[in-house]
Image (cartoon, rainbow, N blue to C red):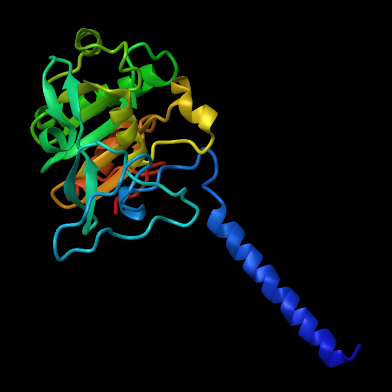
Amino acid sequence: MSRRHLAWLGAVALAFALVAACVRRETAGPATGSPAVPLESRGTEYPGAQAAPAPAGQSPSGPHPRQGAPASHISTGLETAEARVAGSPRRFPNPELVDQDGQSVRFYDDLVRGRVVMVNFSYTQCTGACPRATAQLMAVQRLLGDRFGRDFTLLTLSLDPEHDTPAAMRRYLSAHGGGPGWTWLTGRREDIEAIRRFVGFTDRDPQLDADRTRHTTLVLLGNDRTGRWSSVPALIKPEQIVEALLRTAGERPAAAVAMQGACPPF
């Protein structure tokens, strides 16, 4: 075989290798246990739902989902509301939930729209990382003082909605000193799951993802007025959570706190 033919075969083999590598990269999912991707880095859709039509004159979606993300779309019948995340139009989950006072609320319309919020997932009978995470969030409440409940709110969605009744959630808040501005929410499991998947607090391993005793302790930070969203681990120092929250709100605190372990806002 001539040298020219050998060179041609080598080029063909290299081209096939590159194509195979691209296919593997496109189909590979995120690593198990990888940190949540900020909302503005993901697509507008989430598992189980049919994407809502875009308003006239607007693109039906913002940035495309990141490479490796599983194909997803919104579940039939799930209420959504138009929102903007990092300048892009999104359909935000807006199911009807029930708070600790037994009041029916729309998740986005009543609790997120126009606000700066912290969002986490927990359940009242959790004995794993939840007590530590709750203690950290109580410290955040104290650090924020009278701004908590006025400028900032905390929304906790139950991972055990069948057992977390309004009475159970009230008892939990009372036992831990939760003040006005901290809202616990229960409702249909599929609605809470849709929110959890929308914000990316999931695990690639379906068995781990279904085990609520191993749920993430990340806290989502959002400024709906500007479309700025981020997340931080609940188990870092409370001062770091407050610093990240204030930056998400667009503030520049005079006393900067080291941000090791926090995901920077976008």
x, y percentage for residue 82?
16, 48
x, y percentage for residue 5?
83, 88
Residue sticking out furthest to the front: 76
Residue at (34, 53) in percent of width and height: 43
x, y percentage for residue 256?
26, 46
Q: Quick one: quadrant of the N terminus?
A: bottom right
52 up-or-down from 167: above or below: below
How many tags in the picture? 0
233 up-or-down from 41: above or below: above
Is residue 243 visible to us here? no
Nearer to the camera, 32 or 187: 187
Residue at (54, 35) in percent of width and height: 205
Is residue 149 visible to us here? yes
Q: Quadrant of residue 106?
A: top left
76 up-or-down from 59: above or below: above
Q: Quadrant of residue 56?
A: bottom left
Residue at (23, 43) in percent of width and height: 92
Would residue 13 appear left or right of 243 to someone viewing this image? right
Q: Quick one: quadrant of the C terminus?
A: bottom left
Nearer to the camera, 158 or 235: 158
Residue at (48, 23) in percent of width and height: 211
x, y percentage for residue 24?
61, 58
212 up-or-down from 221: above or below: above
Nearer to the camera, 142 or 150: 150
